[in-house]
Amino acid sequence: MRARLTDATSSRRLLSTVCVSCVLTILVATPAIAVEVLFPEPLHITREITDPISGATVTVDEYCHGNRIAAVEGPRTAIVDYERGEITSIDRSRGTFSITSFEAVASAHQGAGESSKASKPWRVEPVAPGALTGGRSTDRFVATREGGGEITRIELALDRQVHLSKRGIEAILGSSYPNPSSPALDVIEAALEASPVQIQSKATGETVRYPLPVEQRTTYGSGGESLVFSNRVVRVGSELAPSDLVAIPAGFRRVDDVQSARARMLRELDSLSIPGSVQP
């Protein structure tokens, strides 16, 4: 079944967060143009992410402030720094940390998202204006798209109380450099296009504020089968990240990030002298 569906890594990326998913693969905006502060006020989001392939549900705390997002899942922390253009990963269970540049992540994503460009536009329909989601007033939308032999469905609940800049939402969705664009952002923009707030903002020249997605269900279907990934916010607060979770503890050992380790392995393979492979 997996062979007929979008691979698990791409599917998790389209979810969300965070992580998200890896859980901690979240987010990122261009460091070179970080003139705008992404999160002027502290924003603390607690979300639950369910992966239908593993059957696991994990809880991730995302602390957004200034131009950084710190995502904490159990003993692991990923800190995305948009000004420095790097991601710091801390694993307290192993006593290790790694630092990955945005360029390395972008290189690993090369070619990703090309197939989505050939897909048809999203068809977005409002389904429950003002509905309560987790006790919060939201506007719910369903978006469907068919292309490449696969039908994808995204159900979104957008919070009516929390609004951020476009770059802030892109960061939370993991939809900007060095990551490929997330389809959730396309759905949000399509949902906002006909809204009175959007129309008024265009007429007055005001900056459009984007609502925070507090629930997202993404369905990938092919050959009569489907997988549904769930990502929902269970709490929104304004706490700053605890210092003991975002600082690299003394004595922790630095290790290669995934991208660097992969590149080193390929270099080593290229340099191997394999018996019988050398021509006279």
Image (tube, rainbow, N blue to C red):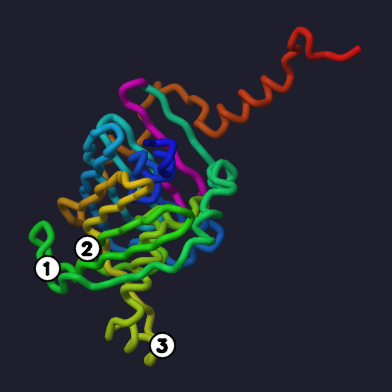
Inspect the image, locate mark 1, and give the three-letter code of the amino acid beneath it.
Answer: Ala
The foreground one among 3 and 168 is 3
The foreground one among 172 and 15 is 15
Earlier in the chain: of badge 2 and badge 1, it is 1
Q: Is residue 125 visible?
A: yes
Q: Which residues are magenta?
A: 80-94
Q: Which residue is mark 2?
A: 157
Earlier in the chain: of badge 3 and badge 1, it is 1
Q: Which residue is mark 1?
A: 131
The image shows residue 17, relative to residue 42, as above or below, that is above
Q: Which residue is mark 3?
A: 205
Outermost residue toward the front in this view: 224
Does 84 lie within the magenta span? yes
Residue sitting at 27 percent across and 47 percent down? 228
Residue sitting at 11 percent across and 68 percent down? 131
Residue 10 position in % (x across, y down): 43, 44
Inspect the image, locate mark 2, and give the three-letter code of the amino acid beneath it.
Answer: Ala
